[in-house]
Image (cartoon, rainbow, N blue to C red):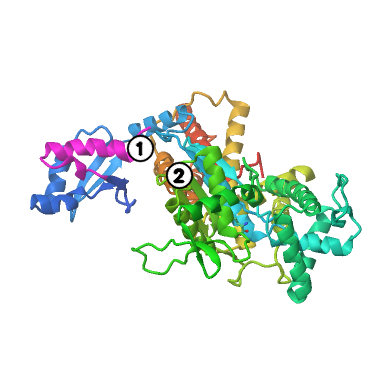
């Protein structure tokens, strides 16, 4: 559906033209003075110079031609040259009814669907998931859903960190503890056990122990580095251990991500890129893209227009080892071969920005990725505690994701239990759903690139700009609709009629913004814009609700119109929270 501002602008364009001015001046925006009008056009000011006329005169000329306009009423030319307008109630109602009939609520799909990969999550296998990975998962999931909603073909790839030094550490520590396992017997030629020699609990204990020891014990660290080297060069026993680590870790990760309502299409990782490295490096050397600098193999990526130095992208260390950048380039080789994506979006901590500038430039320069492929870095800020420092546990340790989620759920459960009628099991289930909204909305309502403070009390509040408030609003609407269907007929076929009250019209005006918000938020991959919108919409609804007797309205036609408006408001809210990656319970 055309956006409402565009429909108004089209009509206004005619009036500009009839009055002898250029049509393109008729740009319409929402009013920034809602007390005076609903929409405004500043075109008269923009045209003043070209027509050598006072803006107010132009505005007045245009307004004259709008006396029997289709869409707008109360049109006024106001000093110094604004055109202020209100939308006709019948048109507003008709637009809402049209939205209601459209399964996408009037939001347009992309004209040319593209193939887009979203690289997000990025957990490091065998290390416990911590809050640092939370942001990537939450933002990435939302971004992926937005891209999918626009009608593109989207693939979410978790890009596991499964090939690094942490693997060497675990192997070394395991050898220390259970040295007689066959993986460590160089002479062993038989089949390795199917069963992993550790549980996820043990694995999570092994890694930090090994990592701590390596920091103190140089010989141990050497051994871990050597184990990493052997693994990366195909050592049979270590590869078998690596597989066990992967299996145990990945099933645990799957469980954790499922709890977060985050779901990946591809479970690829750094290890999957390794097979592409030798040929890639060979070609880059042969074609002169890579050269040796101080013993290392690098690709220059500095460009003339740079105002600061961009160091070369290093692809091989002097000892022959490959690096983070090598893996990312090789992953691009693989993605190009398998999917030929039109775009790849990386949702990663913004402190990695330089790395991605180097990788993107190297990939384009060397033709690993065609010039027209869009590589987009969506860097996010740090999640801080109330003290303004990166979020920690009360004891000052690294907060594990599972514990953080459990804390929030408990907090939610307490709040729900305070005034609940539901049974124990339902209350637990609801606490889970609402708790997730608290975490996700708390994150997504901030611009991704900014740091933010994770404030449990604020995020779990039922009041203010929070996930629970949005869900509470949806549940309130559901409950009214349930009561309505209990004693009356069905919800289908109800139509919105023109608004009577002021808060009713205000709610309608929020609702018609939907497709415009979708367009900008999805285009910019900006979930915070969706949050800002549903907060306004929820506020508009709650104001209307407090000022209106909905179910006791005696005029049947009015009541039906209210209900139709409620149905639409609920659909909009639900469609938006789905893009944010959470859902509403039946009651709370
Ligand atoms: N595993 C990395 C980390 O924890 C994030 C991976 C981001 N994606 C990528 N293609 N490099 O920092």
| Image vertical order of residue 574 relative to residue 388, above or below | above
Between 68 and 425, the one nearer to me in the picture: 425
- With 26 as the anchor, is 141 left or right in this view? right
Q: Residue at x 68, y 59 (%)?
A: 164
Q: In front: mark 1 or mark 2? A: 2
Circles 1 and 2, Cβ within 8 Å, touching? The answer is no
- Residue where numbered disc 1 is placed: 3
Name the disc covering residue 531, or none: none
Q: Residue furthest right?
A: 180
Pointer 1: residues within 10 angstroms few (<14), some, or many (20+)?
A: some
> Label 1 to label 2, Cα distance in Å?
15 Å
Q: Quadrant of ligand 1?
A: bottom right
State whether residue 547 appears in this view: no
Extent of the magenta region: 1-27
Q: Is residue 423 magenta?
A: no
| Image vertical order of residue 23 relative to residue 97, above or below | below
Q: Secondary structure at mark 2?
A: helix
| Residue 361 percent location from the top left of the image | 44, 56
- Residue where numbered disc 2 is placed: 522
- Of the two numbered discs 1 and 2 on the same chain, state the one appearing first in sequence: 1
Q: Is residue 19 magenta?
A: yes
| Residue 191 percent location from the top left of the image | 87, 44
Q: Residue at x 55, y 66 (%)?
A: 296
Q: Residue at x 49, y 44 (%)?
A: 541
* Image quarter (top left, top right, bottom left or bottom right) of the C terminus: top right
* Image quarter (top left, top right, bottom left or bottom right) of the N terminus: top left
Between 472 and 406, the one nearer to me in the picture: 406
| Residue 482 percent location from the top left of the image | 61, 33
Is most of the magenta stretch helix, strand or loop?
A: helix
State whether residue 285 appears in this view: yes
């Amino acid at each position: 559906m055309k956006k409402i501002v565009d429909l108004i602008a089209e009509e206004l364009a005619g009036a500009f033209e009839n009055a002898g001015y250029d049509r393109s001046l008729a740009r319409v925006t929402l009013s920034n003075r809602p007390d005076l009008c609903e929409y405004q056009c500043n075109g008269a000011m923009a045209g003043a110079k070209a027509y050598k006329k006072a803006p107010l005169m132009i505005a007045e000329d245009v307004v004259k031609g709008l006396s029997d306009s289709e869409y707008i009423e109360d049109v006024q030319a106001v000093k110094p040259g604004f055109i202020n307008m209100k939308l006709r109630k019948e048109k507003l109602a008709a637009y809402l009814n049209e939205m209601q009939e459209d399964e996408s609520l009037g939001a347009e799909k992309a004209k040319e669907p593209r193939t887009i990969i979203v690289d997000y999550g990025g957990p490091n296998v065998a290390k416990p998931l911590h809050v640092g990975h939370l942001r990537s998962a939450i933002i990435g999931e939302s971004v992926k859903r937005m891209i999918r909603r626009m009608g593109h073909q989207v693939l979410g790839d978790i890009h596991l960190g499964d090939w690094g030094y942490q693997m060497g550490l675990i192997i070394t520590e395991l050898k220390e503890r259970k040295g007689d396992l066959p993986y460590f017997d160089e002479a062993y030629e038989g089949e390795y056990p199917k069963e992993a020699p550790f549980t996820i609990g043990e694995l999570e204990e092994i890694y930090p122990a090994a990592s701590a020891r390596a920091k103190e014990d140089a010989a141990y660290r050497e051994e871990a580095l050597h184990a990493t080297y052997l693994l990366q060069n195909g050592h049979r026993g270590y590869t078998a251990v690596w597989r066990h680590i992967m299996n145990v870790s990945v099933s645990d990760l799957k469980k954790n991500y499922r709890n977060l309502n985050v779901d990946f299409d591809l479970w690829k990782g750094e290890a999957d890129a390794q097979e592409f490295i030798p040929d890639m490096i060979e070609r880059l050397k042969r074609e002169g893209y890579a050269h040796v600098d101080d013993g290392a193999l690098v690709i220059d990526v500095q460009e003339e227009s740079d105002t600061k130095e961009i160091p070369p992208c290093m692809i091989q260390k002097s000892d022959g080892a490959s690096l983070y950048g090598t893996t990312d380039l090789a992953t691009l080789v693989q993605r190009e071969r398998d999917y030929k994506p039109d775009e790849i979006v990386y949702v990663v901590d913004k402190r990695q920005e330089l790395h991605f500038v180097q990788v993107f430039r190297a990939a384009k320069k060397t033709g690993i990725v065609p010039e027209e492929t869009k590589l987009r870095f969506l860097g996010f800020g740090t999640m801080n505690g109330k003290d303004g420092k990166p979020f920690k546990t009360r004891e000052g340790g690294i907060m594990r994701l599972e514990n953080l989620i459990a804390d929030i759920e408990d907090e939610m459960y307490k709040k729900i239990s305070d005034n609940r009628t539901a049974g124990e099991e339902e209350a637990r289930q609801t606490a889970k759903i609402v708790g997730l909204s608290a975490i996700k909305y708390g994150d997504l309502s901030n611009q991704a690139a900014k740091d933010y403070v994770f404030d449990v009390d604020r995020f779990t509040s039922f009041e203010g700009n929070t996930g629970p408030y949005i869900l509470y609003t949806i549940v309130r609407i559901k409950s009214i609709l349930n009561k309505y269907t209990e004693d009356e007929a069905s919800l289908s076929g109800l139509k919105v009629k023109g608004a009577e009250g002021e808060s009713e019209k205000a709610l309608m005006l929020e609702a018609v913004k939907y497709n415009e918000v979708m367009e900008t938020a999805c285009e910019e991959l900006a979930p915070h814009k969706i949050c800002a919108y549903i907060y306004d919409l929820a506020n508009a609804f709650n104001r209307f609700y407090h000022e209106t007797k909905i179910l006791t309205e005696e005029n049947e036609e009015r009541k039906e119109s209210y209900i139709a408006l409620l149905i639409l408001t609920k659909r909009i809210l639900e469609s938006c929270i789905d893009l944010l990656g959470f859902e509403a319970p039946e009651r709370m």
